[in-house]
Image: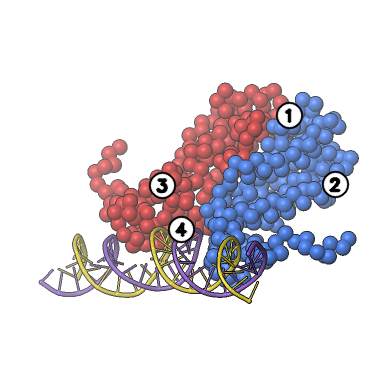
Chain colours: A red, B blue, C purple, D yellow
Amino acid sequence: MLWSVSSDRQEPASPVRRRLLDEAARVLAEEGPAALSARRLVKAVGASTMAVYTHFGSMPALVREVMREGVERFLSRVDAVAPGTDPVRELTELCRVYQEFARAEPDVYAVMFGGSSLAGFELTQGDRKMGVALLRHPRDAIRRCIASGRFRADADADLLVRQLFVQMHGLAQLAHAGYILGIYGPEDVLAGLLRDFAVASGDDPEQAARSVRSGLGE
Amino acid sequence: MLWSVSSDRQEPASPVRRRLLDEAARVLAEEGPAALSARRLVKAVGASTMAVYTHFGSMPALVREVMREGVERFLSRVDAVAPGTDPVRELTELCRVYQEFARAEPDVYAVMFGGSSLAGFELTQGDRKMGVALLRHPRDAIRRCIASGRFRADADADLLVRQLFVQMHGLAQLAHAGYILGIYGPEDVLAGLLRDFAVASGDDPEQAARSVRSGLGE
DNA sequence: TTATGGATATAACGCCGTTATGGATAGCGG
DNA sequence: CCGCTATCCATAACGGCGTTATATCCATAA
């Protein structure tokens, strides 16, 4: 598919916008939220402060764009999880991918779900709904767990997916804050949570443990 | 008990310090972290910016003091949970108190556990250890669940309390961020989490549901 | 060619945390 | 009582922040 013949890029006349976004993502990843400032970004790309306002309108709006691109990366990871014959294993893989993203981009994750304000940026109700929409994948996996008889027939996928969301978020945040210490680390807690989630939902303890081990990559 | 005879107060010569801390807690509770600034605090108490530095040394140090007092309020709530004959109910009550505190003082909670920087304040390793020390109460409750036969004899209280911590933190943060929406609210998720936690730990499903309902206040 | 509109640089405004300086004051040894 | 010292505090400033008003480019449309 030849798609380079003409102007397929959406912003051909403004590489400044792209460079600002890339620099923002870089600073956020390498030095954290405190290092993110308009003056620093424009200095790095050799522009003046007006660049932020002509291309984004405000710093919170720039942060929103950074977050939006982070969500896309998150989705591409989730979509890469292949369905298989074991729905409990698939659910485990989704959770593993969730934790991997939160660990790879902790500050983007914190903006998405952690209530981090980050230069005055605040979540809108639309942002939250988009976040909740990410629960569709695991909810469907839970439904397959029920349909396949692994989970109880009267289990409630909508309630269970919220419980799972809470567990994944709590683990991601506490692990990032350095609060999972002592004899058990984040991996141990993740394995325990997933096994107990399946068991409480009706799965056989041995089978649940096998599926979780398999989904976490042995 | 007559305790007003002489100087019981710890800071009799510096009401400025106390008034700054109270104003900081008030602003944090009523207008959120973004409204907290040294200049605003000193203006409210009728002092100059130097007051912050003579009494605290820096804004992060003032925030640390606010957090420290928040931890004390948290502990006083936890200590108010009376032990009873039903350890699962007691565990549930501890979790209810946890959620009540996080809901009553969400910004103090976010500083304690949420990784919120709040005016440049950062957690020290000592702060984290102090936070982990708060897990002693629920861990002991879990041990009583095991000892009483409600939980499996080979259940691991140290791992389970971390799993419970993750769940309570995740629920507190997502509820505060407005992410628990749709047909099920935070109370439903809390009840489901606690019931499933007990069931996966070996408790009888009916008995678990009864204890959780009772511990959440019917 | 001229006109128009968008991107940009400059400089400023009002915040912020922090600090250097100097003045007030309280306690205390003489 | 005097003078010394130490503490608290007000003033003013510094550099950095997000943001904006203004003016200047410059490419494109008429």
Q: What distance separates the C-alpha of mark 2 from that of mark 4?
A: 46 Å
- Identify the residue at horizontal 72%, vertical 59% (top origin): B10
Question: Which residue was labeled with disc 3?
Answer: A27
Q: Is residue A113 left or right of residue B77?
A: left
Q: What distance separates the C-alpha of mark 3 from that of mark 4?
A: 15 Å
Residue B99 locus on image (x, y percent): 71, 50
Q: Are marks 2 and 4 on the same chain?
A: no
Could you tell me how many numbered marks the image carries? 4
Q: Secondary structure at mark 2?
A: loop
Q: Are marks 1 and 4 on the same chain?
A: no
Q: Amino acid at mark 4?
A: Pro
Looking at the picture, tell me which residue is in the foreground, D3 or A4.
D3
Q: Is residue B63 left or right of residue D29?
A: right
Q: Is residue B193 left or right of residue A120?
A: right
Residue A158 shows in this picture: no
Question: Which residue was labeled with disc 4?
Answer: A60
* Circle 1 or circle 2, nearest the eye: 2
Residue B97 locus on image (x, y percent): 76, 50
Provide the chain ID for the residue under circle 1.
Answer: B
Question: Which residue was labeled with disc 2?
Answer: B82
In the image, is residue A201 above or below residue B48? above
N-terminal label among 3 and 4: 3
Q: Secondary structure at mark 4?
A: helix
Q: What distance separates the C-alpha of mark 1 from that of mark 2?
A: 24 Å
Q: Amino acid at mark 1?
A: Asp
Q: Are marks 2 and 3 in contact (CB under 8 Å)?
A: no
Q: Amino acid at mark 3?
A: Val
